[in-house]
């Protein structure tokens, strides 16, 4: 915390080399040499790489990187890198994938790598008429949009369609605006840069057509034209019997009925998906925003997965959600660890990456529901979390496992109990 005598207003801070910024922050925040060294340890990244990624860089914050195993998707095996700080997530995904293998693993499909670019047109006197004028001029609009990215067009992508909608502003009854959508095939890119450039390029032409004033021109993260789907059949015997099948379905119905439960249900899905997103250098915020917006697209927030029982009494699980991920551009192409993780995963296209991620999200969700519906979520989670608590209490070496096991046995996984146990074991 900055003391009252010192100000956070630092002239020219952004112009300083990153090491000098860190030294300045160390002075202002009263960091120790050890704390500053931890922040400044950039790991696989060089200082010049970090300094180009974001602004006012002073270091990095490492996140544990693990690999989920057992995944078989569309008859192909995958090792799945996952970057996440939460214990039990990777283990749960791996265990669920193992159970799914008995019935063939995961089967996936998708709608293709298509994104929407939005252009907000205001001050239009006759918005419904202007809408038709925009649609009539779509060939010219597409031509202008595609002229800014000939490489994308060369590889089969580019602006493929134009849509237009008259939207009423809820807090201003009778007040409308015209929203133009560019429908863009982004190929193996996430697409933000290409789509945003296209919307900015066609803005003046749309003003000319409509007689209105263009304001925002931006990609939408509600990627409902870039849906990824996955399905798995979990054999009833593999997951603990038909009573477990019924219990998982009841747990799903809870999320279907109650948005408060649905939020946590979908958070479990994103535990897996966001971990793969981060590991591959993709945009976790865009993925999270798109998923939760899609969950509420009907007007009621609902789970992104479904569960039902087939004629054999096995559990059938499915998932559908937007996943706007890429393999070219951004951190995916520039971060050395992300590039290595993509190689571990072995995907060749952005669509393949998205489909594998959907399978991971489905596995993660199934694992959570099965745990909740049977032994409770805390048992397995706390077994793994207990090691972190033991380390935080100061345990080292074999004392970490001894303290962790004792806490789990007592069902008291707490920092204060970890310290008490550690002192007891040291005295023995």
Image (cartoon, rainbow, N blue to C red):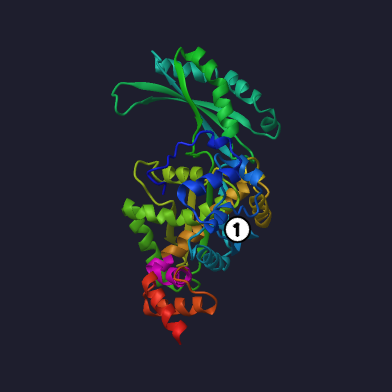
Neighbour tally class for label 1: few under 14, some 14-19, many 20 plus, Cα within 10 Å: many
Residue at image location 40% in from the left, 67% down from the top: 377
Q: Position of residue 119 (x, y in %)?
A: 48, 25
Q: Report helix, strand or loop for mark 1.
A: strand
Residue at 28% across / 24% down in the picture?
A: 173
Q: Residue 83: name its quadrant.
A: bottom right
Residue 410, relative to residue 133: is it above or below?
Answer: below
* Segment colored magenta: 370-391
Place of residue 240 in the rendered image (x, y in percent of width and height, measured from the top left): 45, 74
Q: Is residue 326 visible?
A: no
**Predominant SS of the magenta segment:** helix
Q: Nearer the viewer, residue 342 or 229?
A: 342
Residue 56 against residue 71 in the figure, above or below: above
Does 296 lie within the magenta span?
no
Q: Which residue is mark 1?
A: 81
Q: Is residue 377 magenta?
A: yes
Q: Position of residue 305 (x, y in %)?
A: 44, 54
Residue 41: % across, % down: 60, 54
Residue drawn at 42 percent across, 83 percent down: 424
Q: Is residue 79 visible?
A: yes
As drawn, the residue found furthest toward the front would be: 5
Q: How many marks?
A: 1
């Amino acid at each position: 915390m900055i003391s009252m005598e010192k100000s956070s207003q630092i002239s020219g801070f952004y112009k300083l080399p990153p090491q000098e910024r860190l030294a300045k922050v160390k002075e202002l925040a009263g960091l120790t040499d050890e704390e500053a060294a931890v922040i400044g340890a950039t790991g696989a990244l060089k200082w010049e790489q970090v300094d180009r990624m974001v602004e006012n860089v002073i270091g990095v914050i490492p996140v544990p990187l693990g690999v989920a195993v057992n995944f078989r998707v569309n008859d192909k095996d995958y090792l799945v890198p996952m970057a996440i700080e939460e214990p039990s997530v990777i283990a749960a995904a791996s265990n669920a994938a193992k159970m799914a293998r008995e019935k063939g693993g995961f089967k996936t499909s998708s709608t293709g790598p298509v994104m929407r670019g939005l252009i907000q047109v205001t001050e239009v006197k006759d918005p419904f008429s202007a809408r038709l004028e925009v649609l009539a001029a779509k060939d010219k609009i597409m031509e202008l949009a595609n002229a800014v990215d000939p490489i994308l067009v060369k590889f089969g992508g580019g602006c493929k369609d134009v849509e237009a909608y008259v939207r009423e502003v809820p807090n201003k009854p009778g007040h409308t605006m015209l929203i133009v959508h560019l429908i863009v095939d982004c190929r193996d890119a996430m697409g933000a840069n290409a789509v945003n450039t296209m919307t900015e390029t066609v803005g003046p032409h749309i003003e000319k057509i409509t007689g209105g004033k263009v304001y925002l021109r931006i990609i939408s993260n509600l990627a409902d034209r870039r849906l990824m789907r996955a399905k798995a059949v979990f054999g009833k015997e593999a997951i603990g019997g038909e009573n477990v099948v019924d219990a998982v379905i009841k747990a799903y119905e809870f999320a279907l009925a109650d948005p408060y439960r649905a939020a946590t249900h979908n958070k479990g899905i994103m535990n897996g998906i966001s971990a793969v997103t981060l590991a591959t250098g993709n945009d976790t915020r865009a993925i999270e925003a798109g998923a939760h917006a899609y969950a509420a697209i009907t007007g009621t927030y609902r789970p992104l997965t479904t569960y039902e029982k087939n004629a054999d009494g096995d559990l059938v699980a499915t998932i559908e959600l937007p996943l706007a991920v890429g393999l070219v551009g951004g951190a995916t192409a520039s971060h050395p660890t992300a590039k290595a993780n993509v190689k571990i995963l072995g995907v060749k296209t952005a669509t393949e990456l998205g489909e594998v991620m959907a399978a991971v999200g489905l596995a993660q969700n199934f694992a959570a529901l099965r745990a909740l519906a049977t032994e409770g979520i805390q048992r397995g989670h706390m077994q793994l979390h207990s090691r972190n608590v033991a380390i935080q209490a100061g345990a080292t070496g074999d004392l970490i496992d001894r303290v962790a096991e004792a806490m789990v046995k007592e069902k008291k996984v707490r920092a204060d109990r970890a310290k008490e146990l550690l002192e007891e074991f040291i005295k023995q």
